[in-house]
Amino acid sequence: MVFAPASSYSAGNADTSFSFRYYDYDVNISSSGSEFFRGRLSITEKGKELFSMDSSFTDYVEHKFIDLNGDGSNEMLLYLTEGASPYVFHFLYIFDHTKSAKPLYMLQNGEVDTSVFGKPLLSVNSRMSPAVLGLWYSWFLKYEDNKLKYIKPEDSRRSMLGPDLVNIKENLNELQKSNQVCDDFAYNVFFEYIFITSKISGEESEAERFFEENYKCENKTASLKQFKTTAAENYTWIKDEENYKYTDY
C-alpha cells in the first residue's frame, strides 16, 4: 500500500499538527491558530529530514494524490494558505517523489482540474486589484516531460478562460449612470480584465470590438495600446515555466 491515512503527531505548542505518508516520505505539518506565517512543513524518510519549510504559510488546507503526467506514479498536491491577503486564498505546492522531496512548483490560487477524464490539468487563478471588484482570470498548465507547461485547452475547459462581457457591460453602465467613468479607477480595471482574459482565450478581436463600442474616454488610442501591452506582458509571464518553480526563501 503506497499511502497511509493521516495520523496525529506532537509538534511542540502548535495548535494543529498531523502527518501522512506519500510513498516512502512522512509529511508532517503543524500550524498556529492565533498567528500568521507560523506554519511548519517537514518531509522525512526513515527519520531523516529531507525538506522543511518554516514561517512561509499559516495553515494547511488539504492535500491530494493524483497522476498528473500519466506515468503511473502519483504526484502530491499540497494546499497551504497564508490567510493574510484578499488576493491569495492559498498556494498549491506540487511534489513528485521520483524527482525530489522538495516541491517542484508553487502555484498561487492553484487548483487541479479533472473535468476531462484521463487528462488532469492544473489551473492558476489570479485576482485583480481592487479585490472588491471580484475580477479574476485563469489559465491552465500541464505537468509533462518533467516540466510544467502552459497549455491552451481545446476541450470544454476553454470556455472557462474568456471574459464575462455581459457582467462587465452591466458594471460599466452603472459607472456611467453615476458619472464615474474616466475618473474612476475601476473603469480601466474592467478593460484590463477584458484584454487579459481575451488574450488567454484567443479572443483578442472580440476584446477590441468591445473596447471600440464601450470605451468612453478621450485617450482612446493610447488606452487601447496600453491595454494590449498589459495583456501581452501578462501572457508572456504566465507562459514561462520559471515563474512557477519552487525556490527557498
Image (tube, grey):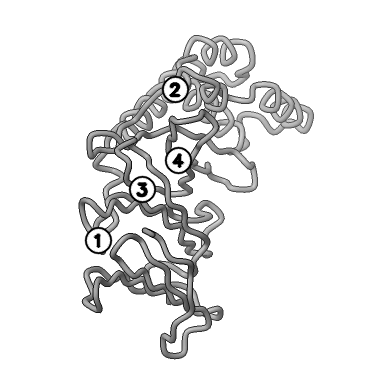
Direction front: furthest residue: 1
Q: Residue at x 32, y 53 (%)?
A: 95
User: Marks 4 and 1: in contact by CB < 8 Å?
Assistant: no
Q: Amino acid at mark 4?
A: Val
Q: Residue at x 42, y 46 (%)?
A: 66
Q: Residue at x 40, y 29 (%)?
A: 230
> Upstream in the sequence, badge 1 or badge 2?
1
Task: Please say if 11 is above or below 56.
Answer: below
Report the quarter where the N terminus lies: bottom left
Q: Label 1, on which residue?
A: 101
Q: Amino acid at mark 2?
A: Pro
Q: Tag 1's secondary structure?
A: loop
Q: Tag 2's secondary structure?
A: loop
Report the quarter where the C terminus lies: bottom left
User: Marks 2 and 1: in contact by CB < 8 Å?
Assistant: no
> Upstream in the sequence, badge 2 or badge 4?
4
Residue 169 at x, y percent in the picture: 69, 23
Task: Please say if 36 is above or below 246.
Answer: below
* Disc 2 to disc 4, C-alpha distance: 14 Å
Mark closer to the observer (1, 2): 1
Direction right: furthest residue: 177
User: Marks 4 and 2: in contact by CB < 8 Å?
Assistant: no
> Upstream in the sequence, badge 3 or badge 4?
3
Q: Label 3, on which residue?
A: 74
Q: Amino acid at mark 1?
A: Ala
Residue 10 at x, y percent in the picture: 44, 86
Task: Please say if 155 is above or below 122.
Answer: above
Q: Label 2, on which residue?
A: 153
